[in-house]
């Protein structure tokens, strides 16, 4: 099965258009942090696939404009146009799945605060091992320290 998954290419959205020829096609595009990635940054990758998986959290961030062209002559006028994220646009046309398990939340108070203020109580933390089995030490280390000759340790 792993042979069928090769090759896997990891690239920034900006590198796809510079690296792959326009006629190149890929099996799937995975967009991480899609809530803070402008849709325009993903267009080169999206044009080369029929499947897209976008991971993002609408509460985690928002996209910022990214300008790569130099200004010629007069200064560019700042735009008041909001930048749409890849997550925002794709969520209007693709099915959504909400993941509510938090893998690494060490502070229950933080999880409670996020649930109250942002997630309407939907987040659940995965339990730590000691929550399941109690405070049992799973590793024991005995350390012996001694200086000087040990009596009775020579050849018999």
Image: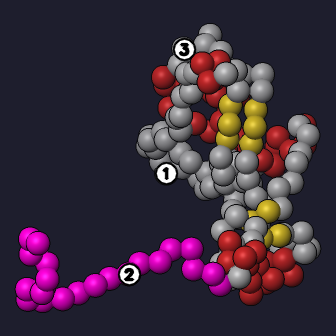
CA–CA distance between discs 3 and 1? 33 Å
Q: Residues within 10 Å of mark 3 (few under 14, many from 20)?
A: few
In whole angstroms, how far apart are the C-alphas of marks 2 and 3?
61 Å
**Residues at circles 3 and 1 in contact by the CB criterion of under 8 Å:** no
The verdict on residue 153 being magenta is yes
Query: What stretch of residues is rendered in magenta?
Result: 135-156
Residue hosting label 3: 21
Q: Earlier in the sequence, mark 3 or mark 1?
A: 3
Q: Nearer the viewer, residue 127 or 17?
A: 127
Say which quadrant the N terminus sits in. top right
Comparing labels 3 and 1, the label whose residue is closer to the camera: 3
Q: Is residue 151 left or right of residue 67?
A: left
Q: Judge left or right: residue 74 versus residue 94.
A: left
Rounded to the nearest whole Å, what is the CA distance between mark 2 and mark 1?
70 Å
| Residue 68: % across, % down | 49, 41
- State the mark number for residue 75: 1
> Does dot 3 land on a helix, a strand or a loop?
loop
Secondary structure type for disc 1: loop
Tell me which corner region of the image, top left, top right, bottom left or bottom right, holds residue 134: bottom right
- Location of residue 61 with respect to 69 vertically, above or below: below
What residue did someone put label 2 on? 142
Q: Position of residue 5 (x, y in %)?
A: 63, 23
Q: Quadrant of residue 108?
A: bottom right
Q: Label 2 neighbourhood size at 10 Å, few (<14), some (14-19), many (20+)?
A: few
Task: Please count the marks in the image.
Answer: 3
Kindly give the residue lying farthest to the front in the view shown.
156
Q: Nearer the viewer, residue 25 or 17?
A: 25
């Amino acid at each position: 099965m792993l042979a069928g998954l090769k090759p896997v290419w990891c690239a920034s959205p900006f590198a796809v258009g510079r690296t792959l020829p326009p006629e190149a096609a890929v099996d799937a595009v995975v967009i991480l942090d899609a809530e803070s990635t402008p849709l325009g940054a993903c267009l080169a990758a999206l044009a080369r696939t029929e499947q897209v998986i976008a991971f993002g959290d609408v509460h985690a961030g928002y996209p910022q404009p990214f300008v790569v062209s130099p200004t010629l002559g007069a200064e560019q006028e700042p735009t008041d146009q909001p930048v749409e994220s890849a997550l925002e646009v794709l969520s209007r046309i693709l099915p959504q799945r909400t993941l509510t398990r938090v893998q690494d939340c060490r502070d229950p108070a933080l999880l409670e605060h996020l649930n109250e203020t942002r997630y309407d109580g939907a987040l659940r933390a995965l339990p730590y091992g000691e929550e399941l089995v109690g405070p049992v030490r799973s590793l024991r280390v005995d350390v012996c320290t001694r200086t000087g000759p040990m009596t009775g340790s020579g050849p018999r």
